Amino acid sequence: MNASAQTHLPESQPILERVSGRVGEDVLEKAASGVRLTEAEIVALYHLPLTEVASVAHRLRLERTNPEVVTFLIDRNINYTNICNVGCNFCAFYRTERQKDSYTLDYLQISHKIRELEAVGGTRILLQGGVNPKLPLEYYTGMLRHIKQNHPTIRIEAFSPEEILGFEKFFNLDAGEVLDILIEAGLDGLPGAGGEILEDEVREKAAPARIRTFDWFRILDLAQRKGLYTIATMVIGFGESLEQRAHHFGIIREQQDKALARGERGFAGFAMWTLQTENTRLAGKAPGASAFEYLQNLAISRIALDNIPNIQASWPAQGFKVAQAALYYGANDVGSTMLEENVVSAAGKHDRHNATVRELVRIASDAGFTPAQRNSWFEIIKYPDVAEVLKVQEPETSFARV
């Protein structure tokens, strides 16, 4: 993924060499007016000048969210086990049970990590792990109860759809029963991990045992019906076509329509990043995606997902500078501190494991926005004193982690 890659676009069938003149203007005018685009029109956006697409995306962002504010969340990723039987080709984090560096955390180790989050004013943990067939259901329910008892102010958003699918198989329960048991024990929401590209043709090539599109939506639909937090996600760079990217947006939008029509909150937001392959079995096989493609796809997501107001910028995969630029390509949020990101960094072989509050505040304020700390539902908790936050001395290299 080098600078020359910025002009690369995946193969599109049928190939549109160029969308220009009246056709392109019509699509942009329709998008700018807030009229929903068809999937074919979404594909057309990829062939228009990025500056024009970004201009429309930013205008829509200013209309759909507070135009002066960029939000962030103080949270922590906790990977309770790295033992996994799925074995995705793009994952460098998972281990088999026999590997020496495989692990499963006990409750006291998890509590220690949460206390570090509480010390910096955190409000949420993202609790995810590998699909570990050796752990009993009681491990998970006991873990949730332990966290709620010892850390009552912390929201628990845990277990990706892939993990819930594993629980169905391991415990001979359907997803609805699994979720009811976990909710009773303290579960507040599900992360959106496992979305990648919601096209089974792509998923089969990248990870044959990976959760399929139907099950991903089936489980998140159940979670939304039960009032749990959910978020929509996307990862580009598998070699997917533009039509497949557009269809990914289309079916996420369709699911959001269903949830909102039922009076539910649906997806709280949308997060997208680029595939990291440097340390995985897909290195040299999947094309990945450049910063240009990331910003392009982000801008198109803002236009396509007309029923999801909150769009996150991604610093773990893209770096802080690209994440800051994303605030003018449709994003209204810079994500979260994470404190301990292990999966993307392992695949990408880089050291972006966490962000400090100072770094996220600086990204927003230097871009000309008012930083605001939010909760999981993108509701503002407080506006930090920017001058006071920026007084904190951190290594000069921290913001330059690109």
Image: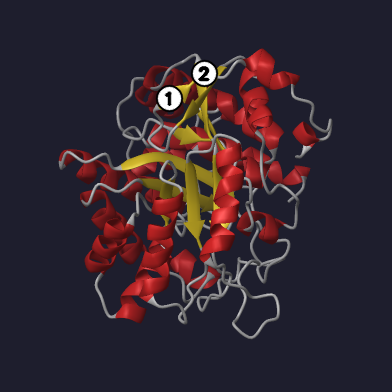
Few, some or many C-alpha atoms within 10 Å of disc 1 (few <14, some 14-19, many ≥20)?
A: some
Residue in the image at 63% along x and 40% along y: 315
Q: Is residue 3 left or right of residue 228?
A: right
Residue in the image at 49% along x and 51% along y: 126
Q: Which residue is mark 2?
A: 383
CB within 8 Å, label 2 to label 1: yes
Q: Which residue is mark 1?
A: 380
Looking at the rendered structure, the secondary structure element under dot 2 is loop
112, 22: nearer the viewer = 112
Residue 374 rendering spot, x and y as whole percentages: 46, 29
The answer to which quarter of the image holds residue 303 is top left
Residue 109 rendering spot, x and y as whole percentages: 59, 61
Residue occupying the far front of the picture: 150
Q: Is residue 23 above or below residue 365?
A: below
Q: Is residue 384 above or below residue 204?
A: above
Residue occupying the far bottom of the picture: 98
Q: Amino acid at mark 2?
A: Tyr
Residue in the image at 67% along x and 21% along y: 389
Q: Is residue 379 above or below residue 200?
A: above
Few, some or many C-alpha atoms within 10 Å of disc 2 (few <14, some 14-19, many ≥20)?
A: few
Q: Is residue 19 left or right of residue 113?
A: left
Q: Quadrant of the C terminus?
A: top right
Q: Is residue 100 left or right of residue 30?
A: right
